[in-house]
Amino acid sequence: MEKTIPELFGSLVFSDKIMRDKLPNDMYKALRKTIDNNTHLELDVANAVAVAMKEWAVENGATHYTHWFQPMTGYTAEKHDSFICPVGQGEVIMEFSGKELVKGEPDASSFPSGGIRATFEARGYTAWDPTSPAFIKDKTLYIPTAFCSYSGEALDKKTPLLRSMDAISKEAVRILKLLGRDDVTNVLTTVGPEQEYFLIDREDYKKRKDLIFTGRTLLGAPAPKGQEMDDHYFGNLRTRVAAFMHDLDEELWKLGIPVKTKHNEVAPCQHELAPVFDTTNVAVDHNQLTMEIMKKVAEKHGYMCLLHEKPFAGINGSGKHNNWSLSTNDGENLLNPGKTPAENTQFLIFLSAVIKAVDEYADLLRLSVASAGNDHRLGANEAPPAIISIFLGDELTGVIEAIEKDEYFGKVEKVKMETGAKVIPHFTKDTTDRNRTSPFAFTGNKFEFRSLGSSVSIAGPNIMLNTAVAEALSQFYEVLKDVKPSDMDDAVHSLVKDTIIKHKRIIFNGNGYTDEWVKEAEKRGLYNLKATPDAMGALIAEKNVKMFIKHGIYSETELKSRYEIRIENYTKTIHIEALTLKDMVLKQFAPSLAAYIDDLTESVLQRKQLGIDVGCDTQTELIKKLAGYYDEIIKTTKKLSEDTDKAEAMDPDIEQAKFYHDVVISDMDEIRKYADAAEPLLPEGYLPYPTYEEMLFYV
Ligand code: ADP
Ligand code: MG
């Protein structure tokens, strides 16, 4: 009999329930303590867990285990070892020890380390993260792990993420204690990422070198129809797409990923999937898995799943909305405005901490979403602008303004609590004004950071967010720590007011797509870091380095390594795009164009020989036009080739990244301009690869 969904859900996860069933009670309790309170894991507990994990994994068909980690590439990495252990006489048993569970030593010399491993130690170590559950995939037991160097430098994205979660928890708990909340021992950040993607036919994909090598199309004229009819958004699902989505849901449910929402997106062939939120590190792991499983299931259905931020010019690209909030160990959402006034004070503190954090560290938030791919979206009237600002909505903005003008606290010393309830009307969810143009929007009981590209690991943006808010809370703590409990309300109110006055420039409820906003933001002194090379400096800016060190998130060495890796990743991406475009132009597009010119010329000549003049003039005109394009395409490609060589010869630093951005990308745009103008003049059959029309409208 088929499994019901509740039976299916998490069936491949070494869940809490399975741990409870399989572990001796004292061992289970010790492990639970480690997970809940971040305490050290003793070896005897690790041994017991390893035995239980192996038993469960083998029962469920696993033969191997792997320490699954997230190097600084933004992807995940794994190396598989089998459980077998020879015991003589040609026999084996299945074995797995606590030591093997807790620590791995992958030969990791080929992962980017930005110089860390050269300076320190060549080896990388993986260490079990017991707060993210192990799972089985393709007959292997996956153990989520952090990845560090011998001397403890983080070589991955999970380690700093876990550090940032610790930091914000520590700061939030301290603040809550001042507010009399002794019950809170731990504060978690929660994240629900909405994931956009494209599905195209696998056969089409295989014919396009640009999609294969770069994930996006480098050439391609628009189809007669785009997304202007808005007929795809939330449209009914085609049978084949529905079958894919159904399969995907099931695969993800088995892995304990609570995917809930799915629908068609704005662009043709574009879709979205969203899970129910989870603690941040679990959400990060789940999102990485989701992206991977999407691609696999797509293949099974004859599709290719495109996660690039801008696979097709002229139609919307794909992003990822990072819904973020704070929750106590009892599951109370600290960004819930709530019904009772006491909660409002608490809410206002956390709200103003976020406002302060986003204003002071907007450069880091911007950096965390910067990539060659996402540069095509941010500020391009389909995604939030590159300028980071906060949308609060009318109701909350009213509250903030009232506080600022003392209309709220000033006149009502005695009954301020009641007033609190009045000015924060009881609302659970702000559905009236959903401003889609804002990069960072308050949506009722959480913030939605909307600037993320579809392929990015959500670890980075959440590290920045957690740390910046931890820093704001830590500064609040300094202001409030010596205040007597009886004066606390007043102290909090003036702190909130001061914070609003100082940071309200970051709040913007209008349309972020307009030129007026760009001008206004400049007047307000907000960052407008247009492209990735402009954003990169934030990683090594003094104020940011100071903050990261203070909270123990990154050391200076770790930051410098990330800075180098980010630059290298950017330049390599553009370099590969340039080479791919050159290849496609010289081997595919230009020859197709030349072939058509030749065919036309031949036909004109033949007719003239026969004394037939009809059409000869118009065809000659067309030949001239096409030959003109051909010339320009070859010339600009030659320039691209020379500039790419120049770029490659430069020292690997920010100047090189800027050169790729300013020169190489403009060359590519120039080629594309001519090629995309010529393409609609080519009859069907001349191009060796599918057009936009064929890729986007026949799936
Ligand atoms: P949208 O209308 O933008 O699609 P939804 O209300 O569907 O927004 O929610 C989007 C995501 O926000 C979901 O993944 C949901 O689980 C997540 N979410 C809801 N509450 C929280 C929270 N407290 N913390 C983090 N994410 C949350
Ligand atoms: Mg959303």
Image (cartoon, rainbow, N blue to C red):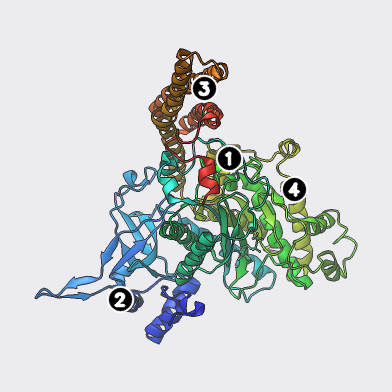
Badge 4: few (under 14), some or many (20 or more) residues near its Cα, within 10 Å?
Answer: many
Camera sees residue 348: yes
Badge 1: few (under 14), some or many (20 or more) residues near its Cα, within 10 Å?
Answer: some
- Comes first in the chain, label 1 or label 4: 1
| Mark 2 and mark 4 residues within 8 Å of each other at the beta carbon | no
Q: Position of residue 300 (x, y in %)?
A: 41, 60
In front here: 202 or 347?
A: 202
Helix, strand or loop at mark 4 = loop
Quarter of image, ligand 1: bottom right
Helix, strand or loop at mark 2 = helix
> Where does label 2 land, which residue?
58
Badge 2: few (under 14), some or many (20 or more) residues near its Cα, within 10 Å?
Answer: some
The mark lying in front, picked from 1 and 4, is 1
Q: Is residue 124 left or right of residue 605?
A: left
Q: Amino acid at mark 2?
A: Val
- Comes first in the chain, label 3 or label 2: 2
> Where does label 3 land, which residue?
626
- Comes first in the chain, label 2 or label 4: 2
Q: Amino acid at mark 4?
A: Phe
Q: CA distance from mark 2 to mark 1?
A: 52 Å
| Mark 3 and mark 1 residues within 8 Å of each other at the beta carbon | no
Q: Quick check: 155 above or below 15?
A: above
Q: Which mark is drawn over residue 508?
A: 4
Image quadrant in which the N terminus is located: bottom left
Q: Amino acid at mark 3?
A: Leu
Badge 3: few (under 14), some or many (20 or more) residues near its Cα, within 10 Å?
Answer: many
Q: Is residue 182 left or right of residue 132?
A: right
In front here: 281 or 150?
A: 281
Q: Position of residue 501 (x, y in %)?
A: 77, 50
> Where does label 1 land, which residue?
223
